[in-house]
Amino acid sequence: MANLQNSLVSVIIVTAGVENYILSCLESLSKQTYPLTEVIIIDNGLGQELKSRVLRESPQVKIYPGPGALSYSASLNRGIAQGRGDYILCLNDDVRLSPEFILNGRQGFSLDDKIGIISGKILRFNDKLIDSAGLTLSPWLTARERGYGRLDEGQFENAGYVFGATGAVAFYRRSMLEKIKSGQDYFDPDYGLFYEDLDIAWRANNAGWKGYYLPSAVAYHLRGGTVRIEKRGIDKRCARLYLNDDLYFNLVRNRYLTIAKNVKFTDLLLRLPLTAIYELAAWSLIIFSRPRLLSRFFTAPVPLAYLLKKRRGVKR
């Protein structure tokens, strides 16, 4: 345990100041059984009153201005660059951690030097439904959370290797982040919101790193709380249906960007039949539920030269 306690952990919280989720997040951090190196908040809209309250109730935290409410990836980059920890825990502000989350998560890194990502068992706030038991790459090349929206009946109590971790609660080994970063960026700043967690997990896997799931590291997530000023869609099963048009556009675009950057040609061919079925369903949904977005997709396509540049910049 002595060696564990000597490892420095930095916590990075990105907040847009929606509601006061940040307060319960910080409260859960204050109860951790593992000594924290630092807690860094990237502020994309706390407001002066909430910011003052945060500093009054948690004077040890450091607050840095963020690049904007929809710039989640760039915000994480800013926080990681400021952090001094050997291990980096990235959190949404609508998350609460169990008291031994960081202790148990940190122990997971000791199982294998190639484990670069730890996923805990993430539940909804009601303590009954699973939010994520590890991030996977679906057969149709989307980000998929294991157990998403299912009743927790003990079906995910076995630890084991997974593809990655949900971006809401993701624990990273800093040395991995340094190895796979592009220039000065750990996360791709062009993403804004969505798919940044799959992209970094995919890059890590392609470079020989591994993700690991630990059911003993328990956290709670209010799905959709961070990005939804309105209450619609929070903790809903098909949360994408409740996104505004800008966020929905990001969700669809970032998936294609992630595939273009990371997929191996042979894998793409093997998955093509299932991917084609998914594409048909996804675009049918857009046509019937959001036809106004069609012009946006076709008038602002991602240039081929840009995709090739992105792919060349991925370390393998």
Image (spheres, helix red, strand yellow):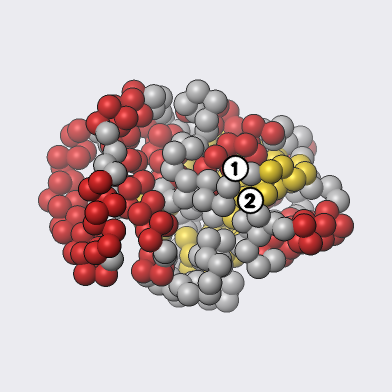
Does residue 292 appear left or right of residue 11 in this picture?
Answer: left
Residue placed under numbered mark 2 in the picture: 44
Q: Secondary structure at mark 2?
A: loop
Q: How many C-alpha atoms fall within 10 Å of the one at disc 2: few (<14), some, or many (≥20)?
A: many
Q: Do we see residue 223 in this rendering?
A: yes
Residue at 25% x, 46% y is 299
Q: Does 103 appear above or below 172?
A: below
Residue 89: x, y in percent? Answer: 62, 45
Separation (CA) of disc 1 from disc 2: 7 Å
Residue 5: x, y in percent? Answer: 76, 40
In the current view of this chain or complex, which residue is farthest to the left? 273
Residue at 79% x, 47% y is 61
Q: Does 235 appear above or below 4?
A: below
Does residue 8 appear left or right of residue 165 in this picture?
Answer: right
Quarter of the picture containing the N terminus is top right
Q: Nearer the viewer, residue 117 or 299?
A: 299
Does residue 133 appear left or right of residue 83 in this picture?
Answer: left
Residue at 52% x, 30% y is 185
Q: Nearer the viewer, residue 21 or 91?
A: 21
Q: Which mark is residue 137?
A: none
Residue 230: x, y in percent? Answer: 53, 72
Quarter of the picture containing the C terminus is top left
The disc labelled 2 sits on which kind of residue? Asn
Residue 183: x, y in percent? Answer: 50, 23
Residue placed under numbered mark 1 in the picture: 67
Q: Secondary structure at mark 1?
A: loop
The disc labelled 1 sits on which kind of residue? Pro
Query: Disc 1, disc 2: CB below 8 Å?
Result: yes
Does residue 195 appear left or right of residue 226 in this picture?
Answer: left
Residue at 47% x, 60% y is 132
